[in-house]
Image (cartoon, rainbow, N blue to C red):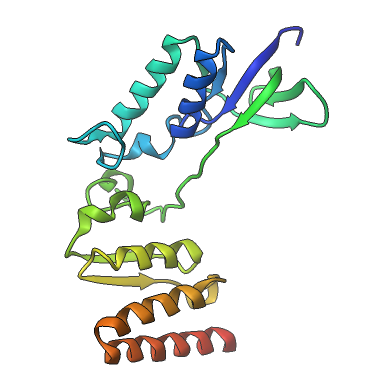
Amino acid sequence: MNNILNVVILGSGCAGNTAAIYTARANLQPLVLEGHEPGGQLSITTDVENFPGFPDGIQGPALIHNMKTQAERFGATYRHAQVTHADLSKRPFRLELDHGEPLQTRTLIVASGASARWLGLPNEHKLIGHGVSSCATCDGFFFRAKKIMVIGGGDSAMEEANFLSRFGSEVTLVFDPLQLAALGAAAICSTMVARACETNWLEGLQLLVIYFIVAVAFWLL
C-alpha cells in the first residue's frame, strides 16, 4: 500500500491499450488490469478491415497483440486481474483486486468496454467470425446480399437490424414479445419505414402496419 501508482487502466481492449500507449510514452508507467476478457471483443474477432493502417485487414487477436507490445515497449505493465472494489472519494484512489490485493493510484482510467450477451448455444463461440457475430457495424460488410437474423428485442438489437438493412437481402428480427424492451423502437422503426417508403410506398405501408400490430400486442401483454 506504500507504493502509489501513477496510472491504473481498467480494460485491455482498443481503448485500454491506446491509453496505455499514451500514458507509457509520457513516462507514467501505467498498470493495465486486463479484466475478465483480455483484449476485449477484438480478441474473439477474426478479420478486422475497418481499422486504419491495415489496407489488407488484420486478425483481431493480432491487432490486440501489436497494441499490447507497443505499450509494453514504452513501459506499460499488464496484469490479468479485475477490480472488485474502488474508493474514489479521495486521492490517491484505493482499489481492491479480485484476489484481495490492494492498490493505490493517482489516476484511474476506466476502459472496461462491453461484453456481448451470447445465447449459450452449442458451438456458438466456434462460429464467431464464420457467420456468427456480435457487432453489426464491425461485420455487416461481410454479409452483403445475404439473409441475416438478429436475435433480441432491445434497443441494441433494433439498431443493429436497422444498420444491417443496408447490407442484407433480408433481415429477420427474432425476439420474445414478453421481453421486448426497446424504448427507442418507435423512432428506429419510423426510420426503417421512411427508408422503405423512399423506394416502395406499399412496402413502407406494410412495415407500418406490422409495427403497429406488434406495438398493440406488446401493450396488451
* Residue that sits furthest to the right in the current view: 90
Residue appearing at x 27%, y 66% in the figure? 166
Q: Is residue 221 visible?
A: no
Residue appearing at x 68%, y 18% in the figure? 101
Locate the N terminus and report the quarter of the image it occupies: top right
Is 216 displayed left or right of 201 in the figure?
right
Compared with 176, 160 (above or below) is above
Depth check, front residue: 146 or 131? 146
**Residue 191, percent from left and from top:** 41, 75
**Residue 19, percent from left and from top:** 52, 26
Q: How many labels, in total?
A: 0
**Residue 182, percent from left and from top:** 53, 70
Is 78 displayed left or right of 98 in the figure?
left
Compared with 23, 200 (above or below) is below
Q: Is residue 101 visible?
A: yes
Locate the C terminus and report the quarter of the image it occupies: bottom right
Compared with 177, 135 (above or below) is above
**Residue 139, percent from left and from top:** 29, 51
Residue appearing at x 54%, y 83% in the figure? 218
Residue appearing at x 31%, y 85% in the figure? 197
Is 56 displayed left or right of 134 in the figure?
left
Instruction: Give residue 157's quadrant in the image.
Output: bottom left
